[in-house]
Image: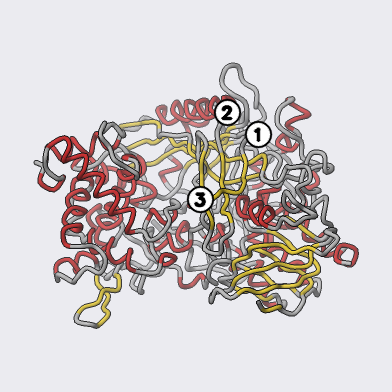
Amino acid sequence: MATQEKVDVAIVGAGPSGAIFADVLARAGKKVVVLEFGPDWDYKQFVSSEIWGRRIKHAPPFQSTGRNPSGHGSNAGWGTGGAMIHFFANWPRMAPVDFKVKSQYGKGLDWPISYDDLLPWFDRAADDIGVSGNAQAERRWYPVGKDYPMPPLKSFKQGDIFNEAFAKHGYPLAPMPVAINSTEYKGRPACVNCGWCHVGCASGAHGTPLVSHLRDARARGAQVRPFSYVTRVLTNQSGDRVTGVEYYDAKREQHVQPAGVVVLAAYAAETPRIMFNSATDRHPKGLANKNELVGKYLMCHTAANVWALFDEDVQNYMGTQANQFMSYEHYDNKTRPSKGFGSIFLRTGAAMKPNVGLASARPDLFGAPLADFMKRAARGLTRIGIFGEQMPLLENRVELASDKDEFGLPIARITHSYDADAIGSWEYGREEAFAIAKAANPKEVWRGGGPGTAHLIGGTIMGTDASNSVTNSYGQTHELANLYIAGAGLFPTEGSVNPTNTIMAVTLRGAEHMAKNFSTIAS
Amino acid sequence: MDNIGRRTFVRGATAGALAFTVGGVEVLLLPSEARAQKVPLKILSADEALRLEAVSETLVPGARDAGIAHFIDQQCSVPPHEALLGIRINNARPPFVNFYRAALNAIDTACQAQHGKPFAQLTAQEQTAFIGTMRVGKHPDWKGPPPQGAIYGAFRADAVDVVYGTVEGFEKLGVPYMALVAPKARW
């Protein structure tokens, strides 16, 4: 086992959260190492193919169980940039109501911070990553700080075709804010609407860590070590400080990386797993887990689609995987009679490719009927997507499985089920979308299956103190002052929107707090 | 369509080529070309390839000629972290060929129990009916794993990949491919 030279900060995971910590701490003059279990990508090498695009998706081995098992493997990212290199670039934010669900509705949990605490960080995230949108159109629903750096993307008929139907049904639309350049931005080109966002954008128009925080962190001296598989966080003898991490490199040789501070940014399944596998006699249940909350309150978004097939060319083969339009109307009405509990979020107007888009619209078809459908769908298919909110439940969790990885360490077991509230919201959202789609007069309209499991959130939640959470609002664990957690795992509730914008705002806030207080935290 | 002129179209390019070994030399070929040239399989037996082709062709017409067996064979022969199979991101554990072998055996075991012959020897009508029942997981004498629905989903997605997920597939559908980086490089 080789022991590396001590650094100020060791970061586990080179996704968006790890990249932000690396950038902010390197900017503050700290010596930073980022350990990433996948390869180091150059975005210019990404290949425009849904088949090739699987190369950038992967998670360490895990088990998935429960009534609604999480599709974590297709959500996760493999390599530098993390899941953000294949995300669809939708950039909505959690709304003010999402941060006080327990106080306002008597269900779920409260965040230890409010929307207003994050507002300046939403602005900062938009500037850093490059966001196109119309802030004024969103202000009817929630406060938006500054205008977005770029105007909205061009819209296409796949989205425009629903505008009137949404309005008639009481869901006014606004342009979806997206982390894609509508104009040249900070030396990166404008999007050409090729629709290959989900397999890795080779132009740099797609906002990812590879063209922002990770690139900048490297320029400031942060070192990124790909193919580094972290197995444990190490602690001192008294168990009150972390001292670094243990990992295997690409040659399967073991290393110790001493560090003043450790940041776990390995996504909502792997971060708890590392904490469990780091158990010592001082931390027999795993690190920062005296209250047994590590791994708990895992959440997914209920995912549904309503599909509509038109005779006319709706230009679905071009545009972006990001949606063109969204609606937060009725978002605050989490309570509804007999139809579950939780917000729903409607969006529409995204490009489709054959496998992820067209063929998945009718999974029941095969043989000649599938071939016929593919031809009709190639220019005529579009959809309305719906995310629904799930409340944090203790029984949805990450724990260690009996199966082991190649190094003999237990893998993660993810247990996930929707309760009646989530199922009710999913059904309600799907019926609302169905009514809207039908009003646009397509030749055919149908409900997709589900509920699917989109995103993976919670598991290491933030809160006011150790009685209700794993970390404080900055991601600093209550038990170990120099162990931080970053990413969606910190969220006590999830709202019903794509999480990346809120992840970045929370992470920027935590990273800047660490930079300002580094001497206290690391001492 | 005002942005159309800025895109790179790759109509006719060898998009989706994989590395196959022909006469001891590694060459880039489409799976369909590898099949037409009778490139030797690395992992699957000839019998397994025929069985895989029969199931895949029933799921997605054109899968046989598009080279589904060579596609799966080549993808099972590369290091697991390089594989581009849908089952990789759906949490299958390598070696991935085990999934395909178990699936083909489960299908043929059920076919033998119901029809007294393997899937590839059923009539087209029987094959369609068998797949329809497998899709909804209703074969009573199933000897999985894998479960019936998982096989349906995975085999169907693979077949969609080779038939529609290439430049040629987009041409069949009559829509432009619009690659930023054409998929010519070794996968």
Indicate whether B119 appears above or below B39: above
Task: From the image, tell me which residue sits under label 3.
Answer: A322
Name the quadrant of the C terminus of chain A. bottom right
Indicate whether B170 appears above or below B17: above
Residue A55 in view of the camera: yes
Disc 3: host chain: A
Proximity of marks 3 and 1: CB atoms separated by less than 8 Å? no
Residue neighbourhood size for the residue with mark 3, other residues' Cα within 10 Å, grouped as few (<14), some (14–19), many (≥20): many
Pointer 3 or 1: first along the chain: 3
Position of residue A186 in the picture relative to residue B29 (left or right): right
Task: From the image, tell me which residue sits under label 1.
Answer: A393
Disc 2: host chain: A
Task: From the image, tell me which residue sits under label 2.
Answer: A419
Residue A313 in view of the camera: no
Give whichever of B147, A321 is nearer the camera. Answer: B147
Q: Amino acid at mark 1?
A: Leu
Secondary structure beneath dot 1 equals: loop
Q: Amino acid at mark 2?
A: Asp
Give whichever of B71, A272 is nearer the camera. Answer: A272
Position of residue A509 in the picture relative to residue A445 (left or right): right
- Residue B168 placement (x, y as % from top left): 24, 61
Position of residue A433 in the picture relative to residue A142 (left or right): left
Q: Which of labels 3 and 1 is toward the front?
A: 1
Proximity of marks 2 and 1: CB atoms separated by less than 8 Å? yes
Name the quadrant of the N terminus of chain A. bottom right
Tell me the quarter of the picture where residue A262 sits: bottom right
